[in-house]
């Protein structure tokens, strides 16, 4: 039995932090499977994931092999049995699309050759450049059903509900990705039939859509026959209708697959995997990851489906660390209720040998995502291998810079993953109980990312969506959101188009990065949110148009705003007393009272660029400035703006270039301090205005991090109040306790415990003890990269144990 509860995976009644490694059985010789699984187990993993490629198991139509009769690497049954026998949980990913660097993204060649009618068509009627199929073509779905019948028959005995290791089943992979990367949608006749039905469901009457588009079609099927005319007549309106259709179509495709699998006996949760990290030569960014979220956000409405993400940031550093913070937070916001934040493909290597990623990248990426609430991750790829029988898109080799090389050799990243595995094993229960403490929320508006296919040749579309894309990247993602991250103002996210009202009780403050375009319903929700007591911070623009370009001033009129203008260029503004703040755009409002003004341009009050205004039971903070972190003083400006909204960061650090967050629960907290910079940094920490860690400083190595327990109860009578060193093992020896600690970054540290225990011994370290009542502060000077402290129960602790035993009897 597997369920989800408060962001954790519950398997047979026990919460589990899922720590996974991708191992492709078909890329490794069967006699090596046990070795690879043993290495994975020794690194602390409890989960193994694998694709199950259709093209590999049915190379010829109607010829199936899951037991290795035609090739030993086709023995899926033996591989799953081995996973079960070695105590792993398992995720199977049988497509139909698997990508996985395989030819045709894992679809058999015979399918494309024998059933060409299933291949998607570009707008001009030519074959789609990737030859992706029309997902919901009836012929394709019939073939998928046959594939599912065969592959699921082999998987069923291994489901966790039948005593096996398989806890999740992935439906397809990166749905819509091939449309996005080619800017080419599917215009096949079958798809246009679906579009006609969708348009009818949206408009109801043919006369309504004819009026909108100046057409005279007799029915929706006829209206859909000449889409070029519709696009040319109302290009913006058509763009949004087409984008909405595809979000509906993707969800229906997932529902089709889920219905097939469930009818065939699959009764574990289903994964939908989200794409979107984009390669820029030798580095990657997550600025477009929300495109994938936008495409697939409706799939979580399919029963039993959870959302997972592909996280591939490449080299990670101070300038792009916010990419994975935002990807984590937004995946959580759009995921199914109760599900864990999950990355089903989490970078542990790279397909090519450039960019070179290192153990530093694996370490930092993992720590940052876990710090922001991730409770399930699966490293891709964890094991290198090779492609048999010429199935690989990039040739025979599939090395991937993986922690375990194709020949079984261990790369440095293996040992890093193992060290993280020890941490997660030690604090896995606490992580499953805890949630990230947030200071505020950001609003995610999916239409700003509904740009996977754009008719750039149309001037109106190019003008509006080009500006929208620039705004969302430079002054939303790398602006407002980046500044909140780097200022250590911890945030969650809210889907602005989710069903139900936005409630101040759920998100007392809400930062919305906006353009001048926003649909009426969302503007009304934001207005009502402020009226109901919420504090809305909106920047850098105020919406004044609906998405289709028609006038829509719901928010502006609610705030009694007249007209405003926008300055662009090399500009300087004053924000809440900080002068000469550089920006490249800012608004200029008229009619703002002096006591409302918070920002103005170089002309002073004549150029009001920001203001605060009460509305209903709440208020609205407008910062009409395109603020970015080109200069670090912008961090203080963002803190001042947040303070104006009533937001104070829970955590503050004396070193400005560290990222900090906290996960809290009734059993204790975990403080995360991560250093994406290129040099070791030393800091003190304040927590809710009080000094933390006893006022002691900590040193964090470059590209590393610390996960430190706060008020963590080890036993009923023993609490770790704080530690400035990472604790990666807690051993209970009778009534005594042994703590093993890592000393990365500093050979000295402080452990503070509370309870009737004394220090009996330290290994690989000297120590000094200061005791006050039941609180013991142990100053440790280590002689190596690790040390341990043994705490021996005093007579008082033994007496308490005896009393409890008597009561039990």
Image (cartoon, rainbow, N blue to C red):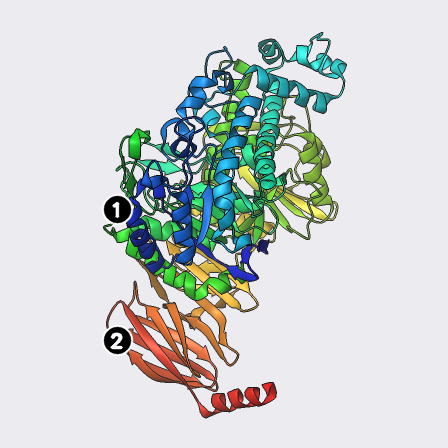
Q: Nearer the viewer, residue 465 or 218?
A: 218
Q: Position of residue 291 (x, y in %)?
A: 51, 33
- Residue 397: tell me if it is visible: yes
Q: Position of residue 161 (x, y in %)?
A: 55, 53
Residue 602 left/right relative to 530:
left
Q: Nearer the viewer, residue 798 or 724?
A: 798
Point out the image quarter for the N terminus. bottom right
Query: Residue 536 sits in which quadrant?
Result: top right
Q: Nearer the viewer, residue 330 or 773?
A: 330
| Separation of residues labelled 2 and 1 (CA atoms) | 33 Å
Q: Which residue is tagged 2?
A: 764
- Give the farthest residue toward the top: 216
At numbered mark 2, what does the secondary structure look like: helix, strand or loop? Answer: loop
Q: How many marks?
A: 2
Q: Position of residue 598 (x, y in %)?
A: 58, 43
Upstream in sequence: badge 2 or badge 1: 1
Residue 608 left/right relative to 406:
right
Which residue sits at x=73%, y=44%? Answer: 531
Q: Nearer the viewer, residue 27 or 689?
A: 27
Question: In the image, which disc is placed on residue 516?
Answer: none
Which residue sits at x=36%, y=80%? Answer: 790
Q: Position of residue 505 (x, y in %)?
A: 68, 53
Within-10-Å neighbours for mark 1: few <14, some 14–19, many 20+ = many
- Give the farthest residue toward the front: 69
Question: In the image, which disc is placed on residue 405?
Answer: 1
Within-10-Å neighbours for mark 2: few <14, some 14–19, many 20+ = some
At numbered mark 1, what does the secondary structure look like: helix, strand or loop? Answer: loop
- Residue 445: tell me if it is visible: no
- Disc 2 or disc 1, which is closer to the eye? 1
């Amino acid at each position: 039995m597997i369920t989800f509860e408060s962001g954790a995976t519950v398997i047979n009644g026990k919460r589990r932090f899922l720590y996974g490694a991708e191992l492709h059985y078909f890329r490794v010789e069967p006699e090596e499977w046990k070795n690879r699984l043993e290495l994975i187990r020794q690194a602390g993993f409890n989960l193994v994931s694998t694709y199950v490629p259709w093209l590999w198991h049915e190379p010829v139509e109607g010829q199936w092999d899951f037991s290795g009769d035609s090739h030993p690497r086709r023995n899926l049954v033996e591989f799953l049995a081995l996973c079960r026998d070695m105590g792993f949980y398992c995720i199977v990913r049988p497509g139909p699309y698997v990508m996985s660097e395989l030819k045709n993204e894992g679809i058999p060649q015979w399918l494309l050759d024998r059933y060409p009618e299933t291949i998607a068509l570009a707008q001009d009627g030519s074959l789609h450049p990737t030859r992706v199929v029309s997902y919901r073509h009836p012929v394709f779905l019939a073939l998928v059903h046959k594939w599912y019948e065969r592959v699921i028959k082999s998987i069923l005995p291994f489901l966790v509900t039948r005593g096996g290791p398989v806890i999740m089943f992935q439906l397809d992979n990166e749905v819509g990705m091939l449309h996005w990367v080619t800017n080419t949608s599917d215009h096949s006749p079958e798809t246009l039939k679906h579009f006609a039905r969708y348009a009818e469901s949206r408009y109801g009457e043919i006369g309504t859509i004819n009026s909108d588009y100046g057409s005279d079609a007799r029915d929706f099927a006829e209206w859909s026959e000449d889409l070029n005319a519709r696009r040319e007549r109302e290009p913006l309106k058509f763009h949004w209708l087409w984008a909405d259709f595809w979000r509906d179509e993707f969800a229906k495709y997932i529902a089709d697959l889920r219905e097939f699998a469930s009818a065939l006996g699959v009764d574990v949760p289903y994964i939908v995997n989200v794409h979107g990290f984009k390669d820029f030569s030798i580095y990657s960014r997550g600025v477009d990851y929300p495109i994938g979220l936008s495409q697939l956000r409706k799939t979580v409405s399919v029963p039993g489906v959870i959302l997972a993400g592909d996280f591939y940031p490449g080299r990670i550093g101070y300038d792009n660390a916010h990419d994975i913070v935002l990807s984590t937070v937004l995946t959580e916001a759009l995921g199914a209720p109760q599900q864990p934040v999950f990355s089903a493909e989490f970078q542990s290597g790279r397909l090519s040998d450039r960019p070179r990623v290192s153990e530093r990248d694996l370490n930092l990426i993992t720590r940052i995502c876990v710090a922001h609430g991730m409770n399930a991750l699966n490293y891709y790829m964890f094991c290198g291998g090779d492609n048999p029988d010429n199935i690989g898109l990039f040739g025979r080799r599939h090395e991937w810079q993986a922690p375990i090389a194709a020949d079984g050799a261990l790369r440095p990243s293996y040992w890093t993953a193992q060290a993280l595995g020890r941490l997660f094993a030690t604090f896995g229960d606490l992580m499953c109980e805890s949630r990230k403490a947030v200071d505020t929320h950001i609003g995610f508006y999916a239409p700003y990312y509904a740009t996977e296919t754009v008719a750039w040749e149309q001037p109106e579309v190019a003008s509006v969506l080009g500006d929208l894309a620039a705004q969302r990247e430079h002054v939303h993602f790398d602006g407002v959101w980046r500044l909140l991250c780097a200022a250590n103002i911890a945030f969650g996210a809210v889907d602005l188009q989710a069903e139900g009202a936005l409630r101040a009780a759920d998100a007392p403050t809400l930062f919305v990065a906006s353009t001048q375009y926003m649909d009426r319903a969302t503007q009304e929700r934001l207005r009502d949110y402020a009226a109901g007591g919420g504090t809305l911070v909106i920047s850098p623009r105020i919406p004044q148009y609906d998405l289709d370009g028609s006038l829509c001033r719901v928010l502006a009129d609610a705030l009694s705003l007249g007209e405003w203008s926008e300055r662009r260029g090399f500009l300087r503004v004053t924000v809440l007393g900080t002068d000469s703040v550089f920006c490249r755009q800012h608004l200029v409002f008229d009619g703002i009272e002096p006591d409302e003004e918070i920002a103005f341009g170089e002309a002073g009050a004549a150029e009001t660029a920001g203001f605060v205004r009460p509305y209903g039971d709440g208020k609205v903070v407008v910062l009409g400035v395109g603020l970015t972190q080109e200069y670090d003083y912008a961090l203080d400006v963002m803190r001042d703006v947040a303070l104006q909204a009533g937001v104070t960061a829970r955590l503050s650090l004396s070193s400005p270039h560290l990222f900090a967050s906290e996960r809290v629960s009734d059993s204790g907290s975990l403080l995360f301090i991560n250093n994406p910079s290129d040099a070791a940094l030393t800091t003190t920490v304040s927590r809710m205005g009080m000094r933390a860690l006893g006022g002691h400083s900590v040193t964090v190595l470059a590209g590393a991090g610390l996960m430190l327990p706060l008020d963590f109860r080890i036993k009923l009578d023993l609490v770790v109040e704080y530690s400035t060193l990472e604790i990666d093992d807690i051993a209970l020896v009778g009534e005594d306790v042994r703590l093993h600690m890592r000393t990365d970054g500093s050979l000295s540290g402080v452990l503070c415990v509370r309870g009737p225990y004394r220090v009996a011994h330290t290994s690989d370290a000297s120590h000094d003890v200061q005791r006050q009542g039941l609180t013991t502060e142990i100053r440790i000077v280590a002689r190596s990269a690790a040390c341990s402290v043994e705490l021996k129960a005093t007579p008082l602790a033994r007496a308490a144990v005896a009393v409890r035993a008597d009561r039990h009897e």
